[in-house]
Amino acid sequence: MRKLFDMDNPLMRILAVAADLLMLNVLTLVCCLPVLTAGAALTAAFDVAIHMVRGEQTYVTKPFFRAFAANWKQATLLWLALLGIGALIFLDYIAALNYLPALKLPVASLAVLLLALSLYAFALLSRYENTVPATLLNAAKLAAGFFPRTLGMVVFTLGLWLLSIQYLQYGLLILLLFGFSLPCYVCALLLKGVFVKLEQDAA
């Protein structure tokens, strides 16, 4: 019994991470509800996930709200910019459905590119201070420069969401429990080496 509750036990580490991700997802969902605050919530979620991957903290709530407050302004501007681009892509997709079906795939591809850009942008904002245009430019460069990692991030995130929607009876629970936090955590795992390289190059 003593070994079962030893934090060196792999099972206990997995359960601890799952519990932290559950709490992180709840915080992110609640703070995304006003919509306007979604950018700050997603940035804070990435901040916590990156620290979790690096083994730099063992709790969630305080770091989340600290990152939420620290990045509020820039994250909101970034969110509004991405939301505006997303709205244009959505309108183009509706128009393609109704008038030019051949354009559905190209427009859908733009949506996937926007997802990749967004994942990098919020992760970058959680780690580095920068303007919104510079953050978006750096996100685009990293997404292209580290394409295999980008592909992994997009496939996991989009796959989780699409499968959850496809099998909504069970998927809704997954989205409520881990829909944001798990993609952030997986992205943080894939971006760990990227950030180490960036920080080594900047040193």
Image (cartoon, rainbow, N blue to C red):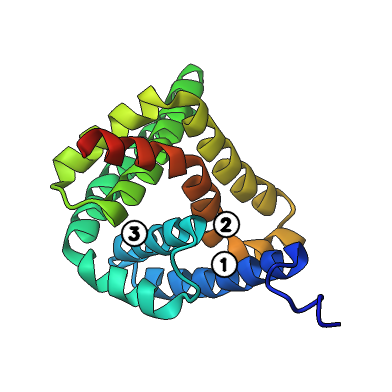
Q: Amino acid at mark 1?
A: Leu
Q: Nearer the viewer, residue 95 or 131?
A: 131
**163 relative to 123 in the view: left or right:** right
| Sequence-earlier tag: 1 or 2 | 1
Query: CA separation, marks 1 and 2?
Result: 7 Å
Query: CA separation, marks 3 and 1?
Result: 15 Å
From the top left corner, tell me how far across and down residue 115 is, in percent. 42, 40
Tell me: residue 38, above or below residue 111: below
Q: Which mark is residue 43?
A: 3
From the top left corner, tell me how far across and down residue 110 is, in percent. 40, 29
Q: Which residue is mark 2?
A: 182
Looking at this view, name the residue that lies furthest to the right: 1
Q: Quadrant of residue 30?
A: bottom left
| Sequence-earlier tag: 3 or 1 | 1
Q: Which residue is mark 1?
A: 21
From the top left corner, tell me how far across and down residue 60 is, in percent. 46, 75
Q: Amino acid at mark 3?
A: Thr
The residue shown at (56%, 71%) is 20
Query: CA separation, marks 2 and 3?
Result: 14 Å
Label 2: element kind: helix
Label 1: element kind: helix
Quadrant where the image shows the N terminus: bottom right
Tell me: residue 127, above or below residue 97: below
Label 3: element kind: helix
Number of residue marks: 3
Q: Amino acid at mark 2?
A: Leu
Specify whether residue 173 is in view. Answer: no
Quadrant where the image shows the C terminus: top left
